[in-house]
Image: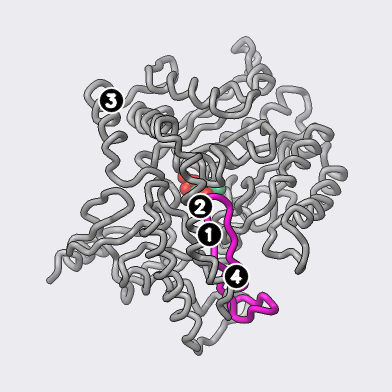
């Protein structure tokens, strides 16, 4: 028996994997990874896979990065953890100072949580609580965009709209106001991203005009709706949204969990709109993909609304046990050092341009409706019918065929439904990008050539399907 198989069998006897129909593993091999180095992962039989999706969008400077390793190791020798209520430590203070100085002026306070979804919960609760502390308890609803994703906990699911993840739990969810997304895939021919995003803002304007008195905040994924299929829009939407939120007295929450730390071409997506949100939620690449941590940055006016004598009971008494973990902070500090020392945002421009050129030819493919890109994220939309942008039925799992082909070629490409995307670590080389483009191209050929006869049950979810 191969080592891979032995580990797989032990795994499948005791584990329950995330985002997975476990029965799929009766035919799909599970891949146990022994080690990682740079953009490569290696399994127990010695086969290597190029990590084209940065291990679910977290890894920016490669696996086992020597500079991050050294910093975490040094921290480990001194302090692994201490509770953050009543206590503090150097890494969390230094990290907070640096996050405040890197993000737009106006964001002056950092609250920590231990994963992205929990960070979203913090922002939602703080916004609601702020209005309560200000004597406006009616402002308790949240405005969200269609096709958005903000995590898996119950309130985070409530403000999300990827039906695959939320449909089952509907009876548990908060009542939100949903506005059509500015998603530019849906624009008419001949209309620019900017024109489309601007036009779609009318829906938001109308919802805010009607409901602002009961709305605490608008929450968005700036520029890229990730889990919803890497759908993209123009920064003008965010500029208009900031102005409207100010006019109507509503908070703006930027969920930059996926797009923060250079993914869109700037350190943070909000920079491209020239705005400052009231809450900025960061996670994923924050620790370079090493350890789970989220940071929620907010403004002095929000902070001051909670600052009072204890007996007034205005404090934000939220806590997660591992808040501000020193090892995670050390990984984050090393990550920020690399951004600074290697001039990463600038260097990524050439890499992003290379990625665009390497994948451009796919736009001509008879089953590709669009190749779109924002910075270091590029997505290829596979469709049944190109002219009508008609999607493949989700039950056909065309993305899964791409995933399996890529594995056979030594690449980890994990499509979202029929959307194949490259979201690589920033330490990828141009020739490795060319390899990924080639593998994606072959995979798309293969996946769209097959005519699959699958009976399609009625009433099934229509949204994106992760291939498992
Ligand atoms: C991944 C993600 C989350 C959730 O983060 P977790 O750490 O998985 O809980 C929230 N919002 C966006 C935009 C994400 O991509």
4 vs 3, front mark:
3
Q: Which residue sits at x=67%, y=53%?
A: 233
As drawn, the label of residue 356 is 1
Q: Examine the rendered structure and indicate whether residue 58 appears above or below residue 371.
A: above
* Residue position for label 3: 75
Mark 2 sits on what residue?
352
Give neighbour class at mark 2: few <14, some 14-19, many 20+ (Cα, 10 Å): many
Q: Position of residue 160 (x, y in %)?
A: 62, 52
**SS assignment at label 2:** helix
Label 1 to label 2, Cα distance in Å? 6 Å
Sort mark 3 into few (<14), some (14-19) or many (20+) by Cα contacts within 10 Å: some
Looking at the image, residue 312 lies above or below residue 83 = above
Q: Is residue 169 above or below residue 21?
A: above
Sequence-wise, the earlier of marks 1 and 4 is 1
x then y, percent, for residue 193: 72, 56
**Of helix, strand and loop, which one carries label 4?**
loop
Q: Which residues are magenta?
A: 369-392
CA gap between label 4 and label 3 equals: 46 Å
Q: Are marks 1 and 2 in contact (CB under 8 Å)?
A: yes
What residue do we see at 69% from left, 35% from top? 274
| Quadrant of the image containing the N terminus | bottom left
């Amino acid at each position: 028996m191969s080592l891979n198989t032995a580990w797989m069998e032990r795994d499948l006897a005791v584990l329950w994997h995330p985002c997975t129909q476990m029965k799929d593993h009766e035919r799909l091999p599970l891949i146990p990874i022994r080690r990682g180095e740079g953009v490569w992962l290696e399994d127990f039989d010695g086969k290597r896979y190029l990590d084209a999706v940065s291990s679910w969008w977290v890894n920016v400077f490669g696996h086992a990065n020597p500079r991050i390793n050294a910093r975490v190791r040094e921290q480990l020798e001194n302090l692994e953890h201490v509770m953050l209520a009543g206590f503090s430590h150097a890494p969390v203070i230094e990290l907070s100072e640096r996050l405040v100085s890197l993000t737009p002026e106006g964001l002056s306070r950092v609250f920590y949580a231990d994963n992205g979804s929990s960070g979203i919960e913090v922002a939602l609760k703080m916004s609601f609580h702020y209005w309560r502390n200000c004597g406006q308890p009616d402002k308790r609803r949240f405005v969200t965009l269609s096709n958005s994703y903000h995590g898996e906990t119950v309130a985070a699911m409530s403000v999300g709209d990827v039906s695959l993840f939320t449909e089952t739990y509907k009876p548990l969810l908060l009542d939100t106001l949903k506005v059509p997304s500015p998603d530019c895939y849906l624009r008419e021919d001949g209309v620019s991203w900017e024109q489309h995003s601007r036009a779609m803002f009318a829906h938001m304007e109308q919802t805010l005009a009607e409901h602002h008195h009961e709305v605490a905040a608008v929450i968005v994924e700036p520029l890229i709706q990730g889990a919803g299929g890497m759908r993209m829009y123009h920064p003008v939407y965010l500029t208009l949204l900031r102005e409207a939120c100010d006019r109507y007295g509503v908070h703006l929450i930027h969920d930059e969990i996926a797009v923060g730390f250079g993914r869109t071409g700037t350190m943070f997506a909000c920079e491209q709109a020239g705005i400052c949100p009231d809450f900025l939620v960061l996670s994923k690449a924050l620790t370079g993909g090493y350890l789970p941590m989220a940071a929620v940055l907010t403004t002095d006016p929000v902070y001051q609304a909670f600052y009072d004598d204890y007996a007034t009971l205005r404090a934000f008494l939220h806590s997660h046990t591992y808040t501000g973990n020193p090892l995670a902070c050390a990984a984050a500090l090393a990550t920020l050092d690399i951004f600074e020392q290697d001039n990463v945002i600038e260097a990524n421009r050439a890499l992003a341009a290379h990625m665009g050129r390497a994948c451009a030819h796919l736009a001509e493919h008879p089953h590709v409706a669009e190749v779109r890109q924002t910075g270091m994220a590029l997505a290829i939309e596979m469709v049944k019918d190109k002219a009508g942008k008609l999607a493949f039925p989700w039950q056909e799992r065309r993305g899964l065929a791409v995933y399996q082909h890529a594995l056979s070629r030594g690449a980890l490409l994990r499509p979202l439904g029929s959307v194949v995307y490259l979201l690589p670590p920033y330490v990828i080389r141009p020739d490795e990008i060319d390899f990924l483009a080639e593998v994606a191209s072959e995979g798309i050929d293969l996946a769209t050539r097959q005519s699959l006869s699958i009976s399609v049950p009625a009433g099934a979810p229509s949204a994106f399907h992760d291939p498992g």
